[in-house]
Amino acid sequence: MKSLQSCRINVMVSNMDAAIDFYQDVLGLFLLDRFGDHYAEIKTPDLLLGLHPASKDTVYGNNMSIGFGVTSFDETVQALKSHGIDFRIEQDVWNRLAHFTDPDNNSLFIAERKD
């Protein structure tokens, strides 16, 4: 794929306004562009998230997971908890992970690598 210019993950959403509010206002990501309720692009460091309206065939909640690497794990968890987000915290030898969901029950997590 010599001509590869960019990559994105498309997330199927049931409510474009709620999804944009969540990814932009709660997670603090940047709304790059919006095309009504048809499509929106959310910019993250090194990744583009595309928000698409879900179809009747969309299965919610278990299709993927999106991870966000952070440098201030505890601070980030507390900031997101202030928005009503519940977490399932997990630690292994290499990482601390905090699993949560977006308004459509898509799996997300924040991760901090242990030194």
Image (cartoon, rainbow, N blue to C red):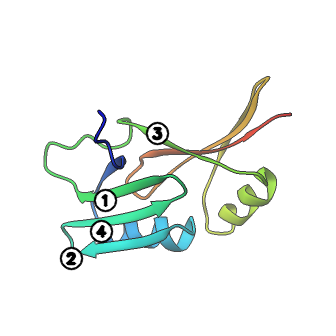
* Circle nearer the N terminus (1, 4): 4
Q: Distance between the residues labelled 4 and 3?
A: 19 Å
Left or right: 98, with 113 as reference point: left
SS class of the residue under badge 3? strand
Quarter of the view holding residue 90: top right
Q: Residue 16 carries which label?
A: 4
Answer above or below: position of 96 versus 53.
Answer: above
Q: How far apart are marks 3 and 1 (CA)?
A: 14 Å
Q: Pointer 3: what residue?
A: 65
* Circle nearer the N terminus (1, 2): 2
Left or right: 35, with 113 as reference point: left
Q: Pointer 2: what residue?
A: 36
Q: Pointer 1: what residue?
A: 51
CB-based contact (under 8 Å), mark 2 and mark 4: yes
User: Disc 3 residue type?
Assistant: Ser
From the viewer's side, name the closer residue of 45 and 53: 45
CB-based contact (under 8 Å), mark 1 and mark 4: yes
**For mark 1, does the 10 Å Cα neighbourhood hold few (<14), some (14 to 19), or many (20 or more) residues?**
many
Q: Distance between the residues labelled 1 and 2?
A: 11 Å
Residue 23 coordinates in the image, percent (x, y): 47, 65
Q: Residue shown at 29%/33% (left/top)?
A: 1
Q: Residue 41 carries which label?
A: none
Residue at the outermost front position: 2
SS class of the residue under badge 1? strand
Q: Distance between the residues labelled 3 and 2?
A: 25 Å
From the viewer's side, name the closer residue of 27 and 70: 70
**For mark 3, does the 10 Å Cα neighbourhood hold few (<14), some (14 to 19), or many (20 or more) residues?**
some
